[in-house]
Image: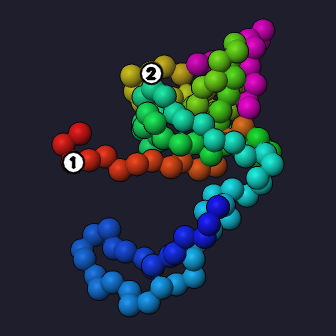
Amino acid sequence: MKTLPFLGYVQAGFPSPASDYMEEGIDLNKELIRRPSSTFFFRAAGESMTGAHIPPGALLIVDRSVKPRNNSIVLAVVNGEFTVKYLVQHQTGCQLVPAHPKFRPMPILDGMDFMVWGVVTGIIIQPQKPGK
């Protein structure tokens, strides 16, 4: 991938004068992908993770080499299907927790076909157009 120009920082609040110079370029591979051989991309579907800033269509960067920690956003396989949720671990086990109140947590039970496939290490979203 080509290195893209980095023009500086921009205020998200009140306007400020723009930089009159260009800083060093940004290599998105270096910024977003720490371990290329274990990193994969997925598109999010559904609304269960919108509270975690993962809208439908978001591009998820998933690293299989990262060990999940409590409250990590993970790509899990449950009964043969992929899902993206928070992995919440507690003394009695773990559960996959959505980031939208309309959806219920999914306890991981004995005998369930369950695997953490990878950890979400980045999320790329497109800004919405006003009025949408």
Query: Most extreme residue toward the front, as rendered?
Result: 2
Rendered position, 70 above or below 92: below
Query: Gap between marks 2 and 1, in whole Å?
Result: 27 Å
Disc 2 versus disc 1: nearer the observer: 1
Q: In the drawing, what numbered circle is on residue 130?
A: 1
Query: Most extreme residue toward the top, as rendered?
Result: 111
**Callout 1: helix, strand or loop?**
loop
Query: Most extreme residue toward the left, as rendered?
Result: 131
Residue at horizontal 55%, vertical 70%? Answer: 4
Which residue matches tag 2? 103
* Residue nearest the observer in this picture, 93 or 96: 96
**One can see residue 120 in this view:** no
Quarter holding the N terminus?
A: bottom right
* Residue nearest the observer in this picture, 2 or 50: 2
- Amino acid carrying label 2: it is Phe
**Callout 2: helix, strand or loop?**
loop
Residue 38 shown left or right of residue 78 in the figure: right
Residue at horizontal 40%, vertical 48%? Answer: 126
Q: In the drawing, what numbered circle is on residue 109?
A: none
Residue 43 lies in the magenta stretch: no
Where does residue 80 sit, x and y in percent of width and height?
A: 70, 15
Residue 127 shown left or right of residue 90 in the figure: left
**One can see residue 114 in this view:** yes
- Amino acid carrying label 1: it is Pro
| Among the 4 quarters of the image, the one containing residue 105 | top right
Magenta-colored span: 106-117
Residue at horizontal 69%, vertical 13%? Answer: 79
Rendered position, 35 above or below 103: below
